[in-house]
């Protein structure tokens, strides 16, 4: 089995997928943070391709950075200055070659995540 990484972002305040949310993926190596790619969610709140495809999968520590503030601005959420949530970093480990699914449930004042399937 080979590993790969996916996500799904849901806007829990509006009860719909978070379309147009920018996501960056980094690999963490010691104190280095290596940018691997940037993707944007589609109309289903998912990316059109795997965030980390099987042919690039390596066991290790990664970070997904969700640009929540820009998304909230784009959908017209009334701004506060500064926004309570702007950039949401999620650092996690992938310890075996498997499908890792890291969803984000987002609202202007909170978020949650879990290892999905």
Image (cartoon, rainbow, N blue to C red):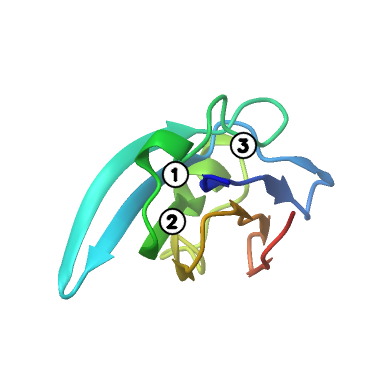
Residue 44: percent from the left, percent from the top? 72, 30
Please identify, in this view, whether the residue under mark 2 or under mark 3 is nearer the observer: 2
Q: Residues within 10 Å of mark 2 (few under 14, many from 20)?
A: many
Q: Residues within 10 Å of mark 1 (few under 14, many from 20)?
A: many
Q: CA distance from mark 2 to mark 3?
A: 21 Å
- Specify whether 22 is left or right of 109: left
At x 53%, y 39%, the residue is 21
Marking on residue 58: none
Residue 53 visible within the image: no
Q: As rendered, which of 9 and 55 lies closer to the eye?
A: 55
Which residue lies at the image location 66% right of the left edge and 45% below the top edge? 8
Measure how far apart labels 1 and 2 are at the Cα level: 7 Å
The answer to which image quadrant residue 17 occupies is top right
Tag on residue 64? 2
Count residues near mark 3 (Cα–Cα under 10 Å), then give few for <14, some for 14-19, many for 20+.
few
Can the viewer see residue 24 in this picture?
yes
Taking the image as shown, residue 67 lies to the left or right of residue 58, namely right
Is mark 1 in CB contact (under 8 Å) with mark 2?
Answer: yes
- Sequence-wise, the earlier of marks 1 and 2 is 1
Say above or below: 105 vs 17. below
Q: How far apart are the two marked residues, 1 and 3, measured between alpha carbons?
A: 16 Å
Residue pointed to by mark 1 = 23
Dot placed on the residue nearer the N-terminal end, 2 or 3? 2
Please say if 6 is above or below 100.
Answer: above
Q: Which residue appears at 63% of the width and 32% of the height?
A: 19
The label number, if any, that marks residue 75 in the structure image: 3
């Amino acid at each position: 089995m080979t590993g790969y990484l996916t996500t799904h972002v849901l806007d829990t305040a509006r009860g719909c997928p978070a379309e147009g949310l920018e996501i960056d993926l980094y690999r963490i190596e010691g104190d280095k943070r290596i940018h691997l790619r940037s993707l944007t969610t589609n109309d289903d709140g998912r990316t059109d391709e795997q965030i980390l495809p099987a042919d690039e999968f390596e066991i290790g520590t990664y970070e997904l950075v969700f640009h929540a503030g820009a998304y909230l601005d784009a959908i017209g959420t009334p701004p506060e200055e500064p926004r309570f949530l702007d950039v949401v970093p999620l650092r996690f480990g992938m310890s075996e070659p498997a499908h890792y699914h890291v969803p984000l449930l987002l609202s202007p004042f909170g978020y949650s995540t879990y290892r999905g399937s």
